[in-house]
Structures are given as C-alpha cells and as structure tokens.
C-alpha cells in the first residue's frame, strides 16, 4: 500500500554502514593506530547503529499506518461512487493490470464497471487523418491541417466525455482506435485517463495536448492514473492539461484517491510520488 521499498533500501544501506563501521573499528583497534582515529571509527559505528534503529522504527510505524488504513478503507469507499458511470481512455494499448485496478476501485466504491473503455493508437498519422476528414466534407474540413491537430484532439476529448453521437470518433475510428468496449452513447459522471505509450513528440504531442484538454474541459471529474514508480511519469502532462492525477493506482491508497477524485474531491496530484500534493485528497463534502 504505502511504498516501503525505499525505506527498506535505506535500512539495508544502514546495515551495511554499520558492518563497515564495526570492521573498521576492529581493524583499527588491532593496528596500533592512535586513540583519536579509534574514537572516530567507534563514533561512526555508533552513528550507523542509531540510524539503523531509526530506520527500523520508521518501517514499523509505516506498517502500523498500512494496517490502520486497511481497516479504514471499506468505510472510506462505501457507496462513494454509487450509481456513477465512469469512462476510461487509454493512450496506447490497454494495460490489463491498470484496467483491473480501475475496475476494482469502482467496485469497492459501489459503482458499476466502466461504461466504456477506449484505446487510442499512437503515434497518429496526421496525413491519414486529414485525408479522411477532407473526404467527409465541410463539417470536418475545419480540423484539416497540422496546425489544427490540437483543436481536433480537443474536440475528440469533448466527444468522448459527452457520449451521444460522437461523429468525429465514428469518422476517425479506424485511424485512431485500437480497442473499444462498452456504450459510447451513454453519458458518464467521470473519466479516467491512462497513458501506456511513451511520451510523444511533434504531431502526436499536439494532438494529445488537445485530447487531454478536451477531456478536462468537460465539466466532469477527470483523473489521469499510473502505477507507482512509473519510469516515465505522465503526471506532469496530466496536470499541465487540467487533469487530476493519481500516481499509485496499483496500491490501495491509489484506489481511494481515485474514488475520492471521481466523487468530486479537489483537483490535484495524489499518491506516493515526489510530485504528489498528498497521498489522498480531502474527501468532498456532501
């Protein structure tokens, strides 16, 4: 739940330092060195021992916090998203583990499974998009051109959030969609965004900027999520485009943060990563 890996690594380092300190102290004691050097070695050893004890206490306290949160989790989640319909969009291929974590979150919070899940293929081929849009006539020509890619992405993000007819997604589905399940027409109460593809540049970057902004502007809770310790975090991108973010969706704290944000908690970045505002948002009132 709370990520203890870094604390355990620190603890191991302290143990190593302690062993080195002991060996140095023993070695100096038998080598005829002066008392000052010997005292220094012993002080270093004692300092390492103190650090070890402090690290052990910290790990023990974190374990207690884990246990306490696990007990509080059912009450925190109970009915939090009852009756809410949530849509999920992947930028890149669908990640089954993250998809399951999102579904588990919705279940724990009393919501049905995702209303729709869509995966966007990247990088986009701007020329192919332009050709299809141009063939469809005046209604879509306004989105033709590399300088219109952000506008196109914004319109697609807005359509995905709103549901209904989604004419742009129907027109460009073969060019953009790799997987799609669920009801595209159904209105939803919140959106989860997952980036599984590596960071994009050029045309695709402009397109995705618009897509994220369109989702964020839909007047619905919209949250970007990723697993803890992601090598190429999408949190800065999500935040820059107006989305909330959860950086530890693979942990119980991430489930709780996502549920609270979808229920209307304050916009922000939450989780165990360095860029998080806090582990959890304040639960929304009402």
Image: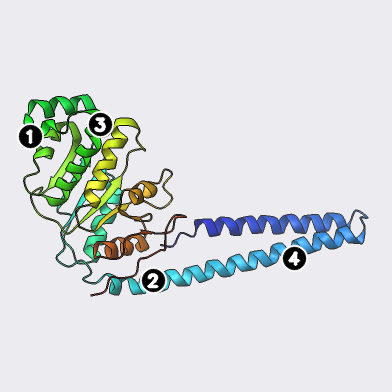
The colour scheme applied to this rendered structure is rainbow
User: Residue 139 — which label?
Assistant: 1
Q: Position of residue 32 (x, y in %)?
A: 93, 55
Q: What element carries label 4?
A: helix
**Residue 216 place in picture, x, y as percent:** 25, 52
Visible residue check, residue 92:
no
Residue located at (41% from left, 43% from top): 232
Spatial separation of the CA atoms under disc 3 and disc 2: 49 Å
Compare marks 1 and 2 and give the one earlier in the sequence. Answer: 2
Q: Nearer the viewer, mark 4 or mark 1?
A: 1
Please report contact status of discs 3 and 2: CB closer than 8 Å, yes or no: no
| Location of residue 129 (image quadrant) | top left
- Look at the numbered disc 3 and give the secondary structure of its residue: helix
Q: Give the class, few, some or many, for how many residues have Cα within 10 Å of label 3's Cα (few <14, many ≥20).
A: few
Residue located beneath label 2 in the image = 69
Gap in angstroms between the C-alphas marked 4 and 3: 64 Å
Give how far across and how far down residue 153 sits, in percent.
22, 39
Q: Earlier in the sequence, mark 3 or mark 2?
A: 2
**Contact between labelled residues 3 and 4, with CB atoms less than 8 Å apart:** no
Select label 4 or label 3 by which is in front. 3
Question: Could you say which disc has been placed on residue 147 in the image?
Answer: 3
Quote the CA–CA distance across marks 3 and 1.
17 Å
Q: Name the residue under label 4.
A: 46
Task: Name which of mark 4 and mark 1 comes first in the sequence.
Answer: 4
User: Which is more toward the observer, 148 or 21?
Assistant: 148
Give the Cα separation between the discs numbered 4 and 2. 35 Å
């Amino acid at each position: 739940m709370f990520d203890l890996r870094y604390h355990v690594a620190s603890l191991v380092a302290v143990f190593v330092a302690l062993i080195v300190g002991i060996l140095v102290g023993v070695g100096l004691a038998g080598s005829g060195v002066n008392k000052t050097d010997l005292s220094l070695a012993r002080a270093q050893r004692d300092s390492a021992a103190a650090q070890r004890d402090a690290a052990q206490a910290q790990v023990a306290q974190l374990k207690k916090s884990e246990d306490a949160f696990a007990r509080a989790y059912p009450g925190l989640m109970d009915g939090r998203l009852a009756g809410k319909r949530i849509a999920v969009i992947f930028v890149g291929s669908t990640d089954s583990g993250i998809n399951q974590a999102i579904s588990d979150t919705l279940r724990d919070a009393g919501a049905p499974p995702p209303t729709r899940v869509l995966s966007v293929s990247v990088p986009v081929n701007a020329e192919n998009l332009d050709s299809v849009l141009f063939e469809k006539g005046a209604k879509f020509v306004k989105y033709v051109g590399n300088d219109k890619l952000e506008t196109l992405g914004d319109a697609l993000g807005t359509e995905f959030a709103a549901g209904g007819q989604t004419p742009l997604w129907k027109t460009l589905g073969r060019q953009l969609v790799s997987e799609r399940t669920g009801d595209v027409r159904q209105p939803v109460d919140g959106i989860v965004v997952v980036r599984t593809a590596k960071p994009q540049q050029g045309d695709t970057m402009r397109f995705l900027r618009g897509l994220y902004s369109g989702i964020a502007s839909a007047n619905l809770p919209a949250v970007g999520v990723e697993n803890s310790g992601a090598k190429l975090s999408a949190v800065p991108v999500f935040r820059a485009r107006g989305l909330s973010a959860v950086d530890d969706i693979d942990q119980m704290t991430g489930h709780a943060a996502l549920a609270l944000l979808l229920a209307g908690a304050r916009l922000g970045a939450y989780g165990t990563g360095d860029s998080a505002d806090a582990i959890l948002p304040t639960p929304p009132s009402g």
